[in-house]
Image (cartoon, rainbow, N blue to C red):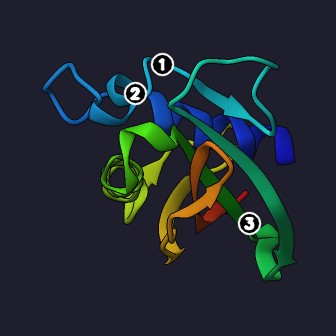
Protein backbone atom coordinates (compact mmCIF):
# COMPACT_ATOMS: atom_id res chain seq x y z
CA UNK A 1 0.00 0.00 0.00
CA UNK A 2 2.90 2.40 0.47
CA UNK A 3 3.44 2.51 -3.31
CA UNK A 4 -0.12 3.77 -3.72
CA UNK A 5 0.46 6.47 -1.11
CA UNK A 6 3.75 7.54 -2.77
CA UNK A 7 2.01 7.74 -6.16
CA UNK A 8 -0.80 9.84 -4.65
CA UNK A 9 1.72 12.30 -3.19
CA UNK A 10 3.54 12.55 -6.53
CA UNK A 11 0.27 13.03 -8.41
CA UNK A 12 -0.63 15.89 -6.08
CA UNK A 13 2.82 17.49 -6.40
CA UNK A 14 2.60 17.57 -10.19
CA UNK A 15 -1.14 18.38 -10.43
CA UNK A 16 -2.25 21.67 -11.90
CA UNK A 17 -3.94 24.20 -9.63
CA UNK A 18 -7.69 24.15 -10.26
CA UNK A 19 -8.61 24.99 -13.83
CA UNK A 20 -5.56 27.21 -14.36
CA UNK A 21 -3.59 24.60 -16.30
CA UNK A 22 -0.50 25.61 -14.31
CA UNK A 23 1.42 24.44 -11.28
CA UNK A 24 3.64 27.17 -9.77
CA UNK A 25 5.68 24.64 -7.74
CA UNK A 26 6.39 22.43 -10.74
CA UNK A 27 7.24 25.49 -12.82
CA UNK A 28 9.59 26.88 -10.12
CA UNK A 29 11.64 23.66 -10.11
CA UNK A 30 11.36 23.01 -13.87
CA UNK A 31 9.51 19.70 -13.31
CA UNK A 32 12.36 18.34 -11.12
CA UNK A 33 10.25 16.49 -8.53
CA UNK A 34 11.64 13.17 -7.31
CA UNK A 35 10.72 10.39 -4.91
CA UNK A 36 13.27 9.52 -2.22
CA UNK A 37 16.38 10.90 -3.98
CA UNK A 38 17.28 12.99 -7.01
CA UNK A 39 19.64 11.63 -9.66
CA UNK A 40 23.28 12.63 -9.25
CA UNK A 41 24.22 16.01 -10.70
CA UNK A 42 20.60 17.10 -11.14
CA UNK A 43 20.35 20.84 -11.63
CA UNK A 44 18.86 22.91 -8.82
CA UNK A 45 16.24 23.90 -7.76
CA UNK A 46 14.39 20.65 -7.15
CA UNK A 47 11.97 18.88 -4.83
CA UNK A 48 12.44 15.48 -3.19
CA UNK A 49 9.71 13.76 -1.18
CA UNK A 50 9.86 10.62 0.92
CA UNK A 51 7.44 8.62 3.02
CA UNK A 52 8.65 8.56 6.63
CA UNK A 53 6.04 6.28 8.20
CA UNK A 54 2.77 4.58 7.35
CA UNK A 55 0.34 3.15 9.89
CA UNK A 56 -2.83 1.18 9.19
CA UNK A 57 -5.79 1.09 11.57
CA UNK A 58 -8.55 -1.53 11.21
CA UNK A 59 -12.11 -0.78 12.28
CA UNK A 60 -15.34 -2.81 12.38
CA UNK A 61 -17.06 -3.44 9.07
CA UNK A 62 -13.84 -3.69 7.08
CA UNK A 63 -13.03 0.00 7.36
CA UNK A 64 -9.32 0.80 7.29
CA UNK A 65 -7.47 4.05 7.63
CA UNK A 66 -3.87 4.58 6.61
CA UNK A 67 -2.00 7.54 8.04
CA UNK A 68 1.40 8.40 6.69
CA UNK A 69 3.97 11.05 7.45
CA UNK A 70 6.10 12.34 4.58
CA UNK A 71 8.79 14.95 4.08
CA UNK A 72 9.03 17.37 1.18
CA UNK A 73 12.54 18.81 0.78
CA UNK A 74 13.15 21.81 -1.44
CA UNK A 75 16.71 22.46 -2.66
CA UNK A 76 18.11 25.61 -4.29
CA UNK A 77 21.52 27.07 -5.02
CA UNK A 78 22.83 29.34 -2.27
CA UNK A 79 23.60 31.98 -4.88
CA UNK A 80 19.83 32.42 -5.42
CA UNK A 81 19.55 33.59 -1.80
CA UNK A 82 17.45 32.46 1.15
CA UNK A 83 14.34 34.14 -0.24
CA UNK A 84 14.23 31.71 -3.17
CA UNK A 85 14.07 28.64 -0.91
CA UNK A 86 11.45 30.28 1.29
CA UNK A 87 9.36 31.08 -1.79
CA UNK A 88 9.57 27.52 -3.11
CA UNK A 89 8.77 26.05 0.31
CA UNK A 90 5.70 28.31 0.39
CA UNK A 91 4.67 27.00 -3.04
CA UNK A 92 4.96 23.41 -1.77
CA UNK A 93 2.99 24.27 1.37
CA UNK A 94 0.16 26.01 -0.46
CA UNK A 95 -0.01 23.24 -3.08
CA UNK A 96 -0.21 20.39 -0.56
CA UNK A 97 -1.77 21.67 2.67
CA UNK A 98 -5.42 20.74 3.19
CA UNK A 99 -5.78 19.12 -0.21
CA UNK A 100 -7.85 16.14 -1.25
CA UNK A 101 -5.95 13.40 -3.07
CA UNK A 102 -6.87 10.29 -5.00
CA UNK A 103 -5.26 7.14 -3.64
CA UNK A 104 -5.71 3.96 -5.69
CA UNK A 105 -7.84 1.32 -3.89
CA UNK A 106 -8.93 3.89 -1.30
CA UNK A 107 -12.20 5.80 -1.09
CA UNK A 108 -10.67 9.14 -0.20
CA UNK A 109 -7.44 10.82 0.80
CA UNK A 110 -6.35 14.06 2.41
CA UNK A 111 -3.04 15.87 3.00
CA UNK A 112 -2.28 18.39 5.71
CA UNK A 113 0.87 20.15 6.88
CA UNK A 114 2.55 19.15 10.15
CA UNK A 115 5.70 21.31 10.19
CA UNK A 116 7.02 24.09 7.97
CA UNK A 117 10.51 24.07 6.52
CA UNK A 118 13.26 26.32 7.85
CA UNK A 119 15.98 27.22 5.35
CA UNK A 120 19.32 25.59 6.10
CA UNK A 121 22.55 26.36 4.28
CA UNK A 122 24.68 23.31 3.49
CA UNK A 123 27.73 24.46 1.56
CA UNK A 124 26.44 25.90 -1.69
CA UNK A 125 22.89 24.58 -1.30
CA UNK A 126 19.87 25.83 0.64
CA UNK A 127 17.42 23.18 1.84
CA UNK A 128 14.05 23.40 3.55
CA UNK A 129 12.23 20.30 4.86
CA UNK A 130 8.49 20.39 5.55
CA UNK A 131 6.51 17.45 6.92
CA UNK A 132 3.00 16.52 5.93
CA UNK A 133 0.46 13.87 6.85
CA UNK A 134 -1.58 11.91 4.35
CA UNK A 135 -4.70 10.07 5.47
CA UNK A 136 -6.43 7.56 3.19
CA UNK A 137 -9.55 5.56 4.01
CA UNK A 138 -10.92 2.28 2.71
CA UNK A 139 -14.53 1.52 3.59
CA UNK A 140 -14.99 -1.84 1.90
Q: Quadrant of the C terminus?
A: bottom right
Q: Residue at (68%, 18%) from the top-left corner?
A: 42
Q: Tell me if residue 138 can be seen.
A: no
Mark 1 crowd level (few <14, some 14–19, many ≥20, 10 Å Cα): some
From the image, tell me which residue sits under label 1.
31
The residue that label 3 is drawn on is 68
Residue bearing the label numbered 2: 26
Residue 35, image x and y in percent?
Answer: 74, 34
Q: Which one is earlier in the sequence, the residue at label 3 or at label 2?
A: 2
Q: Please, what secondary structure does the residue beneath circle 1 have? A: loop
Which marked residue is nearer to the observer: mark 3 or mark 1? 1
Query: Marks 2 and 1: CB-CB under 8 Å?
Result: yes
Locate residue 68, reporting x and y percent: 74, 66
Query: How far apart are the alpha carbons under marks 3 and 1?
Result: 24 Å
Q: Quadrant of residue 99?
A: bottom left
Q: Kindly state the secondary structure of the residue where label 3 is placed.
A: strand
Looking at the rendered image, the disc whose residue lies closer to the viewer, 3 or 2, is 2
* Cβ atoms at labels 3 and 1 below 8 Å apart: no
- Work out how far the residue at label 3 is from the one at label 2, CA to CA, in angstroms: 23 Å
Q: Position of residue 53 (x, y in %)?
A: 85, 67
Quadrant of residue 125 in the image? top right
Q: 48 or 56: nearer the eye? A: 48
For marks 3 and 1, the one nearer the N-term is 1
Residue at x 31% of width, y 56% of height = 94
Tell me where residue 28 appears, x and y as whole percent: 34, 29
Judge the density around disc 2: few (<14), some (14-19), many (≥20) Cα neighbours within 10 Å.
many
Rendered view: 92 above or below 35: below
Would residue 88 appear left or right of 7 to someone viewing this image? Answer: left
Which residue appears at 23% of the width and 23% of the height?
Answer: 22
Amino acid sequence: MSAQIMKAIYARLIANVGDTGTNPLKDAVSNRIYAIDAPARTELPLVVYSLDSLDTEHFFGGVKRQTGSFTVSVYAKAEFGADSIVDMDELAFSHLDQSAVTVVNHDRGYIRNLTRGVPELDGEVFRADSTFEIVAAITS
